[in-house]
């Protein structure tokens, strides 16, 4: 039984919501939020412990594990694709050396479980683009993708070499309305909703027909928690599960918004992120996740659009955005 979980990168897009979801199951004091930045949200700080932690600082990570008697880590701290292309060595350092610190401490302190995120960025231009299989060509052309492939391999190495319980999943673009994503290529799919509500128009940094796999945050939380709770003995794959929900282009996303906001306008001005998006798949085959741990998403594009607009309109009315 897992009793105490450390979450790294807890102020990020996924971390800020995952911590709250885990706390509602495990109890506030049993989910230790941590982030490099000391300014965690009020929600995170008032509902359980928060520790400032740079994942490159192995000693501090070790002391936090001892202090709270942590038995599992969900390691979310990372540099995303667009920031990674601007600063490749930063992406390598944080994504690889941060992960090694987590894996080594988990090994040394005999933690019961580690969950690591991978991404559709593990794929590259030579990977089959449609219904991309679980086992396929992994030759990414971004530093972020290189660190994700290396991370999957490292995690699987620790599973086979040391018999450790490590799981991971390849997130698609994650769309949410609580915390903005930090420097990814799929970020347009979040910004478009905020701009739709605030100004009724959006200039997209990807071209109109760029198809990418995406997922709404409630499904992302469900995928993460379901894999975290899966029976390890039933897993044939470990650190690299494909998970999908739906695929969308900027044009289709705009059409979905127009169903509820007919005057919404979109224009396109592709930048350096277009090349990153072009190297990623259109859609994902997640049959292994479905078969091995029962993965099933709930939200399609229009269901997500309705929910996103409702929540963001309410925030706008309250003057929060
Ligand atoms: N959403 C991520 C990014 O754009 C992909 O994992 O970098």
Image (cartoon, rainbow, N blue to C red):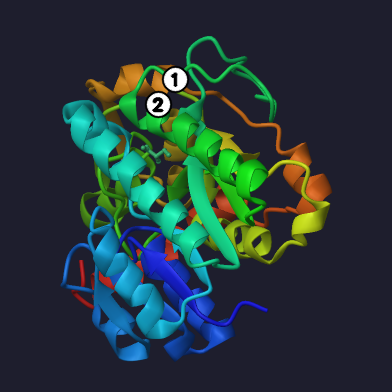
Apparent side of residue 271 relative to residue 142 in the rendered image (left or right)? left
Category of crowding for the residue at label 2, using alpha-carbon neighbours closer than 10 angstroms: few (below 14), some (14–19), many (at least 20): many
Q: Is residue 208 above or below residue 12?
A: above
**269 or 50: nearer the viewer:** 50
**Which comes sooner in the sequence, label 1 or label 2?**
1
Identity of the residue drawn at 30% across and 90% down: 46
Residue at figure coordinates x 60%, y 53% from the top left: 166
Dot 1 and dot 2 residues touching (CB under 8 Å): yes
Q: Residue at x 61, y 65 (%)?
A: 225
Q: Nearer the viewer, residue 204 or 231?
A: 231
Question: Where residue 276 sits in the image (x, y, percent)?
Answer: 35, 22
Q: From the image, tell me which residue sits under label 1.
A: 140
Q: Is residue 20 above or below residue 303?
A: below
**Quick one: SS at disc 2?**
helix
Q: Which residue is mark 2?
A: 146
- Give x and y (percent) for residue 313: 33, 66
Q: Quadrant of the N terminus?
A: bottom right
Q: Going by the image, does 8 lie left or right of 214?
A: left
Q: Can you tell me which quadrant of the image ligand 1 is in?
A: top left
Q: Is residue 72 left or right of residue 82?
A: right
């Amino acid at each position: 039984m897992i009793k105490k979980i450390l979450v790294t990168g807890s102020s990020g897009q996924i971390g800020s919501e995952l911590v709250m979801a885990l706390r509602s199951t495990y109890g506030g004091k049993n989910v230790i939020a941590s982030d490099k930045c000391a300014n965690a949200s009020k929600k995170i700080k008032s509902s359980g412990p928060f520790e400032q932690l740079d994942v490159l600082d192995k000693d501090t990570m070790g002391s936090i594990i001892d202090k709270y008697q942590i038995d599992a880590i969900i390691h979310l701290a990372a540099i995303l694709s667009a920031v990674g292309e601007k600063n490749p060595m930063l992406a390598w350092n944080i994504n690889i050396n941060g992960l090694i610190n987590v894996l080594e401490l988990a090994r040394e302190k005999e933690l019961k479980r580690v969950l690591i995120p991978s991404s559709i960025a593990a794929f590259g231009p030579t990977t089959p683009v449609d219904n991309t299989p679980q086992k396929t060509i992994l030759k990414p052309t971004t530093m972020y993708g290189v660190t994700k492939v290396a991370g999957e391999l490292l995690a699987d190495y620790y599973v086979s070499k040391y018999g450790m319980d490590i799981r991971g999943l390849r997130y698609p673009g994650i769309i949410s309305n609580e915390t903005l994503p930090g420097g990814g290529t799929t970020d347009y799919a979040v910004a478009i909703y905020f701009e739709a509500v605030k100004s009724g128009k959006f200039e997209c940094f990807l071209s109109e027909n760029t198809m990418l796999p995406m997922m709404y945050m409630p499904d992302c939380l469900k995928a993460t928690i379901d894999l975290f709770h899966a029976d390890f003995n039933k897993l044939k794959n470990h650190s690299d599960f494909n998970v999908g929900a739906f695929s969308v282009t900027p044009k289709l996303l705009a059409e979905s918004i127009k169903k509820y906001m007919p005057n919404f306008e979109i224009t396109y001005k592709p930048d350096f992120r277009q090349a990153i998006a072009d190297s990623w798949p259109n859609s994902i085959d997640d049959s292994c996740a479905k078969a091995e741990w029962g993965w099933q998403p709930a939200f399609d594009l229009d269901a997500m659009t309705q929910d996103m607009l409702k929540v963001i309109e309410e925030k706008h009315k309250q003057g929060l955005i």
